[in-house]
Image (cartoon, rainbow, N blue to C red):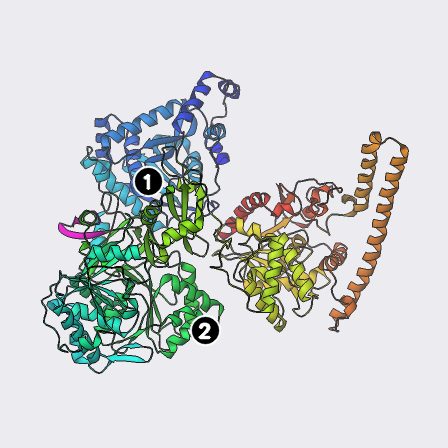
């Protein structure tokens, strides 16, 4: 961008006084301007984080488009009048409105915008420069105050505006990032009509440069109003988004004219059309009140009358019909009423998964009480707090658990030992007066104070949710629904009550069923389940299992509901493929759900299409029929479509609040007015945004709360408990997420004791927190890292190696001898003691050099040879073992995917002389994330180490062209390669052109043209060695004490040189004979003799290249692109294979210029022949190569 900006500062006049310019660079004015900009731009925020439609690519591609619009003349006149009244220019008023828009979009107070200014004007000469206008924007500012602030900044910038932007970046040493422009990513320009006529084509060129930013608002003032273009980066934004953005800016302008003294946060932002859209989205889901005011037990009782003999619940070989379940629940309800249970009574239930559990839940509700689930596996301290906080009067349990609950005030009812007494009660439905506002249950969730908080759900909420869920999930009597979740979590409500209120069968799971992913679906099939509700984390694991194993999909299954945490896109894509493969795309629905406990289980649902490929993240969908959603900024104003804000939910199923926590209830449940209607809303604390179709995208937590494996955890609660330890002075708890989406808690501790150990802290927490809230790692620090303003710097906290396997938690052990041996080999090669068979080689630190060593060990032990690219297809021990055991069934394909992407035109990189493509892995990863990259390698027969490689360059290229066209039948083709790969890529391109195909890019990496170099251009290797020998003699001459030493050294050097020449020529003769025999047999389809097996690929290629060099030169119709390594490494250096080609030839274009009709473009790369493709040099190559690819993909 610096180079581009330098162009923007060029003087259009041909009579610029450059001598005067040089003098100015030494002047006090120059020094003063440098000092001004250093102060003005100190600690500037590097990136304006605008909400985008797609993630920012790691390298800018500068793809852009523009959206044109016009400001009406009457609005412009009003803005001009306002500007005059406020003593500012129209430019400042329009820029101020633009900065307000950016502030409202990003909630960043530090807003930097670039703008071009005419710094000097002498007659018809113009000097333009780019200035950075930095403004601090705040909610409390009025429009008038911000106008004055922008006016001041603009005037000061112009007064210090002679310093070119490129010089500014150079002098102030701003950090460069390939993904965005330095200092500012948004530009604003306003030009008058007479300036446009003078500038002519110059303005168009400026506009093109500005389009390389994220956004450029380019305005032209004319008599009929203002014509505008909003140029945007199409990698980041869609046209529809830009159209809405322009509408928001115009709405702000109208608001500024209407009330220039308004606080900027109160200015209208949404267009009238957008407001109406929000109303329609929420109107479409309103109007599902609880008809007839039935509560949940009455809905169940009505169903009992309809289907008394239908099976209501099953567990193992036991079952209860609807009538049996109702009668037992009635008996329990009468018994509880005799103990004083009535409306609003809280009854604890501590029962393992069983038929009695369902009887207990219904019995409590029928008695008029509200149930409070208690997990016997929770720490005693936590259970004691919950029992006391809820003031539980009666506790339902079983004999085995009666001692699990700490001593308390509640009466205990054992459903097993006391059942004979309970059955003496009536089996008729008990009469109890319950209203919608009465409590149905209280579930405790993590709290930020160190203690859990009880969420109070009413009968209205439970019944409204049940009706909506039945409708959305289409639950019917024919369904058989798995009861998966613990009743301690509200996901169980989603499984139990919609099922029992429509006559379906509830099937309780066993622990064995879910503990074995491999047999889970088979068990589902055996049970003939139709509906599954699974935690997202469990479903992720299940999907991974389905991806790697041939597991049949249960024929009975019609619906899978997931929820509890964000669903990852990749498992969804695997699921879609699995469903399609199973032939159930039209019969099996996946629904992604979202919902805090405070909204009664589920707030929104998103039906995932079984056939339409997922793009981006997985939405959480739209609200259930009885709910409404609103996405608001921090001032509880609606945000536009696509702009992040906090998700608020309102409707019938909102919780009453938090038990015994009135202040927290008031904070989280607010009253808000929309369209003159007062609504009660729950403040979720979740960041979200509306997508254009009304679906909601979840973006994460605003506060310090997280969800891990479906459990909601307040990090503050874990921190609060940790600080109760007498030897812990400071603590911070964060979430670490690996590449697979696995989340873990990390606790950072500052201790007053030098002997405090991890195990002691872990034991301390185990007594006070449930297992799902336990940190996976503990990091002891001498002090917490702080930001300049004294706050905890969470970004500076060190990331621990949570995969170091200090425990065996995630260690998957070998299952056979092959895996065991591979574990031993990997451990030795990688230097890691404990390795899981599911670990990824590259994620453990493996790279191409280690891969060579690894495959050498594998070949030595298993007597099998594989191309290194097998590691891309089988990067784990588990996968590699399967390859070893099954690869004899066929050959390895020539095409291997080095990087998956979405680009229309893939890049093909051809193997080097050793037949490897793994050397391109780093280059592939440094290219645009959307760029697909394939490697082309020789084919190996899997039951031997014999390469299926022809002995002629033309045949090699012909075979690879066929393989490549299987992947990409039509052009344009992008081909490249290092060394031998460059030669093969060139020949492939010539053959493709002969077939009438388009090949716009041939990327040659440090390769000599065998046909074009000629003998007189190449320095023979032996000559280079002789020169090295002579230099050694000359350099050592004065350092020797006697000529005897010199002669001894000369003799040694000469002997080595002669030995090298003799052995080289002998080996070459032998290899040539073997290769000629190999060619003879291959040409005639004769069995390859043993003598010709195991010939190194490099030898075959060298033989073929020598012959190719003597053939008629091929010619590429177009321009070749050459990358040259530049490091010079002497032959005395061990890294002789890293010597750049430019060190061995006299032709700077390596002979390629003779074989391209439009010549050669050459780029120099730091690094040697091999290391140019390794970090850090590969980054430079990727930056130079990407624009060539982008130009073709446009």
The answer to whether residue 1096 is above or below residue 1037 is below
User: How crowded is the residue under tag 1: few (<14 C-alpha within 10 Å), some, or many (20+)?
Assistant: many
Front position in the image: 753 or 848? 753
Residue 755, image x, y percentages? 45, 43
Q: Point out residue 541 in the picture as x, y percentages from the top left corner.
A: 42, 64
Question: On the image, which quarter does residue 1067 sit in?
Answer: bottom right
Examine the rendering and report whether any part of residue 211 can be seen.
no
Q: Single out the residue that lies furthest toward the top.
A: 28
Q: Which residue is mark 2?
A: 551
Picture quadrant where residue 1163 is located:
top right
Disc tally is 2
Q: Which residue is mark 1?
A: 228
Rendered position, 1165 above or below 426: above
First in residue order: circle 1 vs circle 2: 1
At which x and y percent is residue 321?
A: 23, 80
Q: Give the side of residue 558 with respect to residue 166, left or right.
A: left
Question: What kind of element bears circle 2?
Answer: loop
The disc placed on residue 913 is none
Q: Residue furthest bottom?
A: 309
Q: Which residues are magenta?
A: 667-682
Residues 603 and 752: in front is 752
Q: Examine the rendered structure and indicate whether residue 94 appears above or below residue 738.
A: above
Residue 673 visible from this viewpoint: yes
Looking at the image, residue 564 sits to the left or right of residue 460; the answer is right
């Amino acid at each position: 961008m610096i180079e581009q900006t330098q162009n923007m500062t060029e003087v259009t006049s041909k009579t610029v006084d450059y001598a005067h310019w040089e003098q100015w660079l030494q002047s006090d004015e120059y020094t003063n301007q440098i000092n001004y900009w250093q102060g003005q731009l100190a600690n500037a925020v590097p990136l304006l984080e605008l909400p985008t439609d797609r993630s920012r690519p790691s390298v800018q591609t500068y793809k852009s488009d523009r959206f044109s619009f016009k400001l009406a003349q009457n609005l412009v006149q009003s803005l001009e009048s306002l500007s005059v009244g406020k003593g500012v220019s129209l430019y400042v008023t329009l820029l101020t409105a633009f900065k307000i828009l950016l502030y409202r979009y990003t909630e960043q107070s530090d807003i930097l915008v670039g703008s071009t200014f005419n710094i000097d004007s002498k007659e018809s000469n113009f000097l333009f420069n780019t200035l950075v206008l930095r403004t601090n924007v705040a909610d409390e500012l009025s429009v008038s105050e911000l106008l004055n602030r922008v006016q001041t900044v603009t005037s000061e910038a112009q007064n210090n505006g002679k310093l070119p932007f490129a010089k500014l970046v150079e002098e102030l040493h701003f950090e460069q990032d390939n993904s965005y422009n330095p200092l500012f990513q948004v530009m604003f320009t306003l030009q008058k009509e007479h300036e446009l006529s003078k500038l002519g084509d110059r303005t168009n060129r400026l506009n093109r440069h500005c389009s390389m930013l994220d956004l450029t608002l380019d305005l032209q003032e004319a008599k009929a109003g203002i014509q505008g273009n909003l140029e945007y980066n199409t990698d980041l934004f869609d046209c529809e988004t830009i159209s809405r953005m322009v509408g928001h800016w115009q709405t702000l302008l109208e608001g500024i004219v209407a009330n220039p003294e308004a606080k900027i946060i109160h200015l209208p932002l949404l267009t009238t059309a957008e407001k109406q859209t929000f109303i329609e989205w929420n109107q479409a889901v309103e109007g599902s009140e609880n008809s007839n005011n039935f509560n949940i037990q009455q809905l169940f009782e009505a169903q009992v009358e309809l289907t008394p003999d239908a099976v209501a619940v099953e567990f193992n070989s036991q079952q209860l019909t609807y009538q049996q379940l109702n009668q037992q629940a009635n008996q329990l309800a009468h018994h509880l009423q005799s103990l004083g249970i009535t409306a609003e009574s809280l009854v604890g239930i501590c029962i393992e998964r069983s038929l009695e559990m369902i009887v207990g839940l219904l019995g409590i509700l029928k008695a008029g009480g509200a149930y409070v689930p208690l997990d016997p596996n929770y720490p005693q301290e936590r259970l004691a707090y919950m029992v006391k906080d809820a003031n539980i009067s009666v506790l339902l349990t079983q004999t085995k658990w009666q001692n699990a609950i700490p001593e308390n005030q509640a009466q205990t009812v054992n459903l097993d030992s006391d059942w004979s007494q309970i059955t003496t009660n009536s089996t008729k439905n008990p009469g109890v007066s319950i209203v919608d506002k009465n409590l149905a249950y209280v579930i405790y969730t993590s709290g930020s104070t160190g203690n859990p908080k009880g969420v109070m759900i009413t009968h209205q909420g439970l019944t409204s949710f049940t009706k909506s869920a039945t409708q959305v999930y289409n639950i019917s009597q024919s369904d058989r629904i798995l009861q998966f979740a613990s009743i301690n979590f509200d996901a169980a409500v989603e499984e139990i009550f919609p099922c029992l209120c429509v006559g379906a069968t509830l099937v309780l799971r066993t622990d064995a069923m879910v503990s074995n992913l491999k047999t889970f679906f088979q068990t589902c099939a055996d049970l003939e389940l139709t509906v599954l509700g699974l935690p997202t984390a469990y479903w992720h694991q299940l999907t991974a299992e389905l991806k790697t194993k041939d597991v049949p999909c249960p024929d009975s299954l019609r619906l899978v509901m997931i929820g509890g945490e964000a669903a990852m896109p990749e498992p969804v894509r695997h699921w879609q493929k699995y469903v399609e493969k199973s032939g159930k795309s039209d019969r099996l629905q996946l629904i992604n759900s979202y919902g805090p406990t405070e909204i009664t289980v589920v707030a929104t649902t998103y039906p995932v299409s079984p056939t339409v490929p997922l793009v981006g993240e997985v939405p959480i969908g739209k609200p259930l029929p009885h709910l409404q959603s609103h996405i608001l900024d921090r001032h509880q104003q609606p945000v536009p479509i696509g702009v992040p804000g906090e998700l608020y939910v309102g409707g019938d199923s909102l919780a009453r609040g938090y038990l015994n926590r009135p202040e927290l209830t008031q904070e989280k449940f607010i009253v808000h007015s929309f369209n003159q209607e007062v609504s009660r809303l729950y403040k979720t604390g979740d960041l979200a945004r509306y997508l254009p179709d009304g679906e909601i995208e979840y973006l994460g937590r605003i506060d310090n709360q997280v969800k891990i494996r479906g459990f909601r955890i307040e990090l503050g609660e874990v921190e609060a408990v940790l600080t109760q330890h007498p030897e812990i002075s400071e603590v911070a708890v964060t979430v670490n997420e690996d590449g697979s989406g696995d989340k873990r808690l990390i606790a950072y501790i500052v201790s007053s004791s030098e002997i405090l150990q991890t195990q002691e802290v872990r034991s301390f927490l185990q007594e006070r927190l449930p297992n799902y809230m336990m940190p996976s790692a503990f990091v002891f620090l001498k002090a917490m890292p702080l930001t300049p303003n004294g706050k905890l710097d969470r970004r500076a906290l060190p990331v621990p190696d949570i995969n170091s396997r200090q425990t065996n938690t995630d260690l998957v052990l070998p299952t056979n001898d092959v895996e065991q041996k591979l574990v031993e080999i990997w451990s030795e090669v990688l230097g890691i003691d404990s390795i899981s068979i599911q670990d990824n080689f590259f994620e453990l630190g493996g790279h191409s050099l280690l891969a060579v060593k690894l495959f050498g060990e594998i070949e030595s032990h298993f007597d099998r040879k594989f191309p290194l690219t097998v590691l891309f297809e089988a990067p784990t021990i588990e996968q590699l073992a399967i390859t070893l055991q099954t690869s004899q069934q066929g050959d390895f394909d020539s095409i291997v995917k080095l990087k998956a992407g979405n680009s229309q035109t893939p890049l093909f990189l051809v193997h080097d002389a050793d037949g490897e493509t793994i050397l391109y892995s780093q280059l592939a990863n440094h290219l645009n994330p959307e760029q697909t990259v394939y490697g082309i390698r020789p084919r190996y027969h899997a039951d031997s180490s014999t390469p299926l490689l022809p002995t002629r360059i033309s045949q090699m290229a012909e075979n690879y062209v066929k393989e490549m066209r299987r992947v990409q039948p039509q052009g344009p083709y992008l081909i490249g390669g290092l060394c031998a790969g460059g030669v093969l890529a060139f020949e492939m391109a010539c053959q493709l052109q002969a077939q009438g195909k388009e090949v716009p890019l041939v990327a040659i990496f440090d390769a000599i043209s065998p046909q074009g170099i000629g003998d007189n251009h190449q320095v023979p290797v032996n000559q280079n060695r002789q020169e090295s020998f002579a230099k050694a003699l000359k350099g050592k001459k004065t350092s020797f004490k006697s000529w005897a030493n010199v002669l001894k050294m000369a003799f040694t050097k000469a002997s080595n040189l002669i030995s090298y020449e003799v052995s080289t020529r002998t080996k070459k003769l032998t290899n040539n004979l073997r290769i000629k025999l190999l060619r003879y047999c291959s040409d005639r389809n004769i069995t390859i003799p043993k003598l010709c097996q195991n010939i190194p690929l490099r030898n075959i290629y060298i033989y073929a290249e020598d012959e190719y060099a003597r053939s008629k030169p091929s010619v590429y119709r177009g321009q070749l692109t050459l990358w040259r390594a530049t490091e010079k490494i002497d032959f005395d250096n061990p890294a002789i294979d890293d010597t750049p080609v430019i060190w061995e030839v006299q032709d700077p274009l390596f002979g390629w210029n003779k074989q391209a009709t439009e010549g050669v473009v050459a780029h120099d790369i730091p690094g040697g022949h091999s290391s140019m493709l390794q970090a850090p040099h590969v980054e430079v190559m990727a930056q130079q190569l990407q624009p060539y690819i982008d130009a073709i993909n446009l």
